[in-house]
Amino acid sequence: MADLLPEKWMKAIAVTTTVLAVVASIASSRSAFFIAKAQLLTALEGSQWGYYQAKSIKQNLYETQLKSFEVDMLGDINPKQKELLAQNLQNYVKDIARYDKEKAEIRKQAEGTNKENEIVGRRGGQFSLAVVFSQIGIMLSSVGALLKRKEMWMVGLVMGAISIFFLANGFLLFL
């Protein structure tokens, strides 16, 4: 009977270690996925802000040219020149308004990408924590089996439970 209890305990340690290894594997895979996704989103966001800057520069050029046309309109010009300048003024005003609209859309996309990136980063962090705690749980369970110390295995179970919490939180993100 005395030999039966340690055998059951060792089976429990084996099952615990196996479950924690599976948790670590899943969490590691998801963590790597979210790290890669965060890198892609960061690059996308940078690209969107670069595009926004390009539109701002073009808009600034149009605004500068518009001011030049306005000054030209004040000078000595013939009716044909005046008509051409008026038409250019009208076109430039439309283009500047178009750039304002395009910039607003780009800004909205970039800010949306930023928000998505924050969520992806939080989820990846949760999976990374699940990996850490599952590895600690595996280590404590293994050392507990080697030293025949049940309390180490119990602490390993607690670490495993924390790991499972972070794994679930990575999928559901309730924190």
Image (spheres, rainbow, N blue to C red):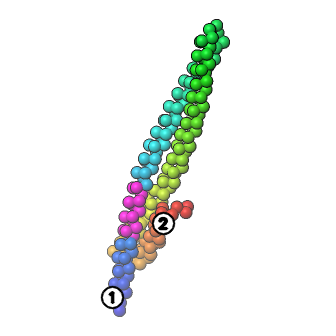
Determine if the magenta segment contains residue 30.
yes
Residue at the (48%, 60%) spot, across then down: 126
Say which quarter of the image contains residue 27. Answer: bottom left
Residue 37, position in %: x, y? 43, 51
Which quadrant holds the N terminus?
Answer: bottom left
Which mark identifies residue 129? none
Q: Can you name the residue that lies furthest to the bottom here?
A: 1
Residue under pointer 2:
168
Q: Secondary structure at mark 1?
A: loop
Residue at the (59%, 12%) spot, across then down: 81
Determine if the magenta segment contains residue 32.
yes
Q: Secondary structure at mark 2?
A: helix
Residue 124, position in %: x, y? 46, 56
Residue 109, position in %: x, y? 53, 44
Which mark identifies residue 3? 1
Residue 128 seen anywhere in this rendered image of the structure: yes
